[in-house]
Amino acid sequence: MAFLRITAALLLVCAARLGAQAAKASEAQVKAVFLFNFAQFVDWPPEAVPDSQTPLVIGILGGDPFGDFLDATVRGERRGARPFVVQRYQRVEDITRCDILFINRSAGAQPEEILARLKNRPILTVSDADRFAERGGMIRFVTDRSRIRLQINPEAAEAAHLTISSKLLRVAEVVTPTGH
Amino acid sequence: MAELRTVAAATSLVFTLGLVCFVQPGLAQQPDSAGQGPDSSLSAQALKKLSIEQLMNLQVTSVSKRPEPLSRTASAIQVITREDIRRSGAASLAEALRLATNLQVAQLDSRQWAISARGFNGTAANKLLVLIDGRTVYTPLFSGVFWDVQEVPLADIDRIEVISGPGATLWGANAVNGVINVITKDAKDTQGLLLTGGGGTDQHGVGTVRYGTALGSSVRARIYGRGFDRDATALPGGQDAADDWHLGQGGFRMDWEASSASHVTLQGDLYDGRIAQDSGGDIAVSGGNVVAKWSRMLSDKSSLAAHLYYDRTHRDIPGLFGEDLDTYDVELQHATRLGARHDVVWGLGYRLINDRTSIGSDSSLAFLPLHIARQWFTGFVQDEIALAPNRLHLALGTKIEHNDYTGFEIQPSGRLNWKLSPSATLWTAVSRAVRTPSRVDRELFAPAKPPYFLAGGSDFHSEEELAYELGYRQQEGSIALSVATFYSRYHGLRSLEQVNPPTPVPLVIGNGQDGESYGAELTADYRVTDRWRLRAGYTELRVHVWPNPGSTDASRGATESQIPDRQFLLLSSVDLPAHLGLAAWFRAIDDINDQLVPAYAELNATLTWQPTPHLDLSLVGQNLLHGQHREFGAATSPTRRDIQRGVYGAIAWHF
């Protein structure tokens, strides 16, 4: 009986605390927050950061799946003294200064071409395109059974002189380029 | 032992209540200027507070893919992830199942485990359905599982879903008190070479080689080979119990993304092992399986899936008996949305078994007839009705099964899922489930030739269960809490009836007992910081069994259910600097059947070091608190074995 009472009490306590919070989030929202978080887990080479106030640019190439959620995510945030800025690009040629680039699946169907044009620029390339990391991209979002996992290609990051924290590597699947 | 009981109860109570009190105020109540859709999604501010790992664990909804029916099911479900297994240092599938706090898990000797949910545990526990990638692994011999040949390489496991309570409507017969669903990784997630090796006092030696590669642009495959050698357990006096054993296993899995909408999987395993016995020759086990699966999204509202498998097992216990079992199984499932409110899933299945047994040299028992072939036809349908979309869902369904022993069996259920808020769910369910007869109930005779002192019951019918469940789940920031309570009534539980009372033998197997079970399962996950995670589980459980009028079985279920009244588990996992990780895993298990097995508490600890993403070193201490302890079996039983303290080291190298 004591046990039933405790269970009932527990249920009541929980019921009293019902907040308005979701257990689920949309895929695009979670990806946007990942993009923001990547800034904390990546170190850029000094030449990519002209001064300590330089904005940290998160770029989107191709269609924008995030709506204004990415903007809302980074609003008011800083990495050290660097404020965050979101840029949208239609073509690779438009990309000027960029630190993290999300390549939309549609634009990234043939990522080799895009990646070749960005080659060795200190830009963290991220996409949800198929086999993105194996094809030379740095981070791929994999949606698997309703959860988002990361595949990371550290070799590609190293080639661009980016350092990805082991904390991020530890939770990700490390892949190596298949070289075609 | 009352002391332990009190300590366990008090600790868990304080812990759980502590968790509730630490629950942060609703994160989403903070002002948030944008991004808050009309649906009850998390805000940007709330999401930003989550760690990378939490983000990865968050279930996301995408338009094209329906959330898994399982996770929506109004039932007591726990999920063990690959990461949980890695951190725990578990050495076998059975040991990893200890992480599911809604299971009763006891190790009998070096290879045998008693595993059940909601009571009715025993060496031949028979009310649990165990699936590995959709393949049923319980034996039709006694409806239980030979855990010694379910050695799935732990590195290949994606997750283990454990449901306590009836799952018969969707999952089928034998899912009376629970379902364990082991799901291995897609071949695309196991690319490259993996070498693991290790050894220690209990795990004498273990090694795995796995290689995954791409075969063309849309096909990924892996192959693996694995072998281990495990030490014997101990006799009560500390002497070697001579039950050491070894097993070799190999297999493959191939995944083909035939198009963006269809997926084909082909997989298989082969194994061969030898288990020493203290008397008589070694037990020989061998077998294999091949599974083909296909799934296709027909539209954004409808999907089709099918599987086909063949499984073969061989077991020869010198002196006692031998068995060769072939299983053929095919299943088709269709899920579709009808209108705005109905999610319908239905399926058809067929299974054929061909079981050939032989009588051992001792002639102590026989399954008669020695050779049988049996068929099962199943059909099921479930409609999940959105009474109030995204708030109140009612799932009504039934399984209809035809088996060669008892003909048609109907297993309906009704489940109601009420989302009280975006973070809290209340659910309730009423279900009927049956355990259909297995060979042991109808066809077991001892000794092998008349006169028999024990005979199978030619009219043994299905054991029936009617279960009522009520549960509550809440996820709030870094805390997830769940409570499941249940009450079940059982009719026609197995009994041993005296043929000529009061003469004790001969005995015949009957359905002379009824029973009830009730209890509560509490679990809590708490991410204290990004680096420190706690999981606690506490289960209270009572099973009462009594004879029906006319029954001569006075055991009151002593042979059908051997369980502790309560158990407590606490798992703490910390990421330390320098890529070190430390996990400790404490369990306190109450005594079984009035001191038949005394209560015990044990601790496992695992230190892991990942100096590079390619290298993983671990040092595991198992059952550290005692030199040896007993988990199952009466003190006087000749088969009683004690589980010893063990230490082993392991290395895994990915490249």
Image (spheres, coloured by chain):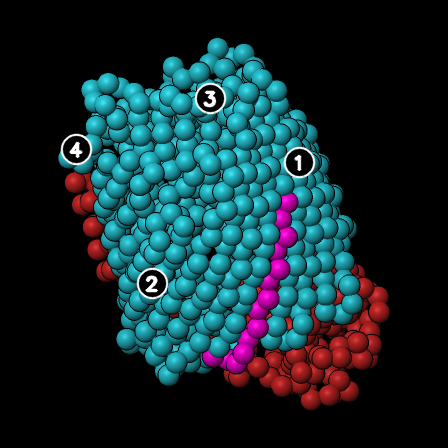
Chain colours: A red, B cyan
Q: Earlier in the sequence, mark 4 or mark 2?
A: 2
Callouts 4 and 3 in the same chain:
yes
Callouts 4 and 2 in the same chain:
yes
Callouts 1 and 3 in the same chain:
yes
**Label 1 crowd (10 A; few <14 / some 14-19 / many >=20):** some
Mark seen at residue B550: 4
* Residue B2 percent across, percent down from the top left: 27, 25
Mark seen at residue B364: 3
> Chain for mark 1?
B
- Give the SS element for disc 1: strand
Mark 4–mark 2 CB contact (< 8 Å): no
Callouts 3 and 2 in the same chain:
yes
Amino acid beneath label 2: Thr
Amino acid beneath label 1: Asp
Q: Earlier in the sequence, mark 1 or mark 3?
A: 1
> Chain for mark 3?
B
Give the residue at mark 1: B272
The magenta segment: B288-301
Give the alpha-carbon distance from disc 1 to disc 2, as whole Å: 39 Å
Give the alpha-carbon distance from disc 3 to disc 2, as whole Å: 41 Å
Decide which of B219, B362 is in the foreground and name it: B362
Q: Earlier in the sequence, mark 4 or mark 3?
A: 3
Mark 1–mark 3 CB contact (< 8 Å): no
Q: Principal SS element in the magenta part?
A: strand
Q: Can you tell which of label 4 and label 2 is closer to the viewer? A: 4
Mark seen at residue A104: none
Give the alpha-carbon distance from disc 1 to disc 3, as whole Å: 26 Å
Residue at 51% over, 62% down? B331
Q: Earlier in the sequence, mark 1 or mark 2?
A: 1
